[in-house]
Image (cartoon, helix red, strand yellow):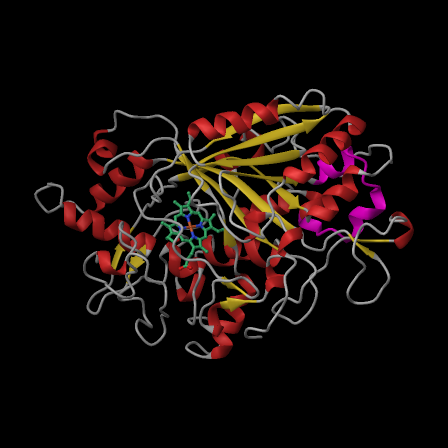
Amino acid sequence: MGAVAVKLELGDIQGLFARGYGDLKAAAFLLLGIEDAVAARRWLSEIAGAVTSAEARPAGHALNVAFTSSGLARIGLPADAFEMFSNEFVTGMTTPHRSRILGDLDGNAPERWEWGGPSGPQIDLALLLYALDDAGLQRLEEEQTGRLTAGGLVLRLRLGTSDLDDFEPFGFRDGISQPFVEGLSKTGPAERTVRAGEFVLGYPNEYGLYTDRPLLDANDDPASMLPRDPQGSGCADLGRNGSYLVFRQLQQDVPDFWRYVDGATRGPDGTSDPHARVRLAAKMVGRWPGGAPLALTPDADDPALADANDFAYHELDPRGARCPVGSHVRRSHPRDSLDPRPGTGDSWEINRRHRILRRGREYGTSLTIDEALAGGDTSERGLNFICLNANIQRQFEFISHTWLNNPKFDRLYDDADPVTAPSAPFGGTFTIPTDGVRERVTNVPRFVSVKGGAYFFLPGLVALRYLAGMTGEPGNSSSPVGS
Ligand code: HEM
C-alpha cells in the first residue's frame, strides 16, 4: 500500500507499540491470576491512569498491561464479546494445531512448559514493568505488588530480565531491524514502511482494510466510553488502539550453540578455528556478532555497519552466497526476495503483510565464546520474546511456520531456521551457498527451547477503563491459559 498519512491516537495506545523502552534498562514481567473480578476491576480503574501511553517517551519508568482471553473472561467480559477477537487469541497458543505450527512438540510441548501450558498456573494478566535501573524497578515492583491482594490478583510468576547491552545470549547484537510504522515519528523508505493497522487495531492494514477486532453492541456501552466503529456500524470499538502481544519464554542453550559451531568448523587436525566458527555462527544468524549484515559485508564484521538495515537481497545476493537464504534474519524478513517477482515492489508488498514489532528482553547472564565452550556455567539464559501484531495468524504464526520452521523455505530442502527452529522433524541441515561448491552442515541440534508462552491482548487506554467499569459476572474462557 505504501505510506499514507494516518493520525494515530498515541495517547490511547499503550507505549510498547511506539517503543521498546530501550532507555529503561531494567524490566520485569509479572504474570498474574485474577481471583476476584470485582476487586480486579477496581484495581484496573486505579492503575489505568498509570499505564504508559505511546504519546511521549517515558522519563523514569513505564507500565503496560495485557490480558489473556481467560483474563478478559474472568474480569467479566461477556462471552459474546469474544466472537470478534481473533481466534488465535481466544483459543490460545497451546491448541494441537498451534503446537504443530509453532513447532511446540516433544520436549517443547505445552505439557512441559513452566507456564501457559495445561499444567501450568492460570495466567490472566501480564504487567510489564520498566525502569531506568534495578533500584527504580524494585520501587516500581514493590508499589505494584503491594496492590495485588487488595486487587483480587495473585502473582503466579515473575519473569526477570537482564541488560546484556543490546546483545542476545548467543552473543549477537539484537534489536536492530524493526519495521517503520506509518504514523510514528521515525520514518524510512516506503517499501519498508508498514501501515499502522498491521500492529494496532482500528486503522487500515496493508490490504487497506480494518483488521478484525472486538466490536460491541452499542447497548453494551451506554455511557459511550468507547469510540464508535470508524466504518459506521454504530458498534462500540473495544479493539481500537489495542494490539495482540505474543509472549514466548525461549531458553537458549549457549554452550551447546558454540560447541556445535566449534565442532563443525574444526580443522583436519581437530583443532578449533576461531575465525571459521564465528563465520559459521554469523552465517546462521545472517548478521555478524557486532550486528553488521552479511548481505553488506560477507567476509568480516564491520563496526561501521553495526546498525545497517537499509538493504535488500535480490540484486546483491540472489542465491545467498553472502547471507544464506536459510539464515535467521533472511528467513524472518526476506525483504525483496519473495516470489513470484523477487526484486520488485510486489515482493516488498507481500513482505509487509508479515511483519512484527519485536519488543523482547533477554534474561540470564552473558557468556563469552570461551566461557561457553568451557561449559562450566549451566545457568539458565534466554530471550523473553515479545512481539506485537494485529493478526497473530498472518504475522507471528506465519513467520514461525512458513518461514522459520519450514525446511523447504525458498527452495531449501531440509533446512529449518538454524537458530530458533526445532531440529527433526523440521530439518537439521544448514546450507551455505558459496560462489564455488556449497557448504552444508548437518545434524544441527535445537538450541532454543520453549519454557512458556501465551497470546495477550494489549488494550487501548480507554478500553482499559471500559473493562474496569464493567459490572458483569466473571465468565470462563473457552481456553484458559493454564489449568
Ligand atoms: C531465542 C530466540 C531468538 C534469537 C536468539 C534471535 C536472534 C536474532 C538476532 C541476533 C537478530 C538480528 C538483529 C536484528 O535484526 O535486530 C534477529 C532478528 C530478527 N528476528 Fe530473531 N531471534 C530469536 C527468535 C525469533 C522469533 C521467535 C522470531 C519470530 C517468530 C524472530 C524474528 C526476527 C525478525 C523478524 C528479525 C529481524 C530480521 C530483519 O528485519 O532483518 N526471532 N533475531
Q: Residue visible at 81% across and 36% down?
A: 76
Quadrant of the image for the C terminus? top right
Give the quadrant of residue 233: bottom right
Work out whether 213 lies above or below 251: below
Give the quadrant of residue 315: bottom left
Is residue 43 one of those drawn in magenta?
A: no
> How far across and down, in percent of the image, does residue 289 sit?
27, 49
Quadrant of the image for the N terminus? bottom right
Report the number of discs. 0
> How far across and down, in percent of the image, does residue 188 sit?
45, 68
User: Which residues make up the magenta segment?
Assistant: 69-88
Given residues 141 and 297, the one toward you in this image is: 141
Work out whether 99 lies above or below 12: above
Q: Is residue 457 left or right of residue 338?
A: right
Observer able to see residue 385 = yes
Q: Is residue 191 left or right of residue 128?
A: left
> How far across and down, in percent of the image, does residue 198 sit?
60, 61
Q: Residue furthest front?
A: 59
Is residue 76 one of those drawn in magenta?
A: yes
Q: Residue visible at 74% across and 39% down?
A: 72
Q: Is residue 324 left or right of residue 407?
A: left
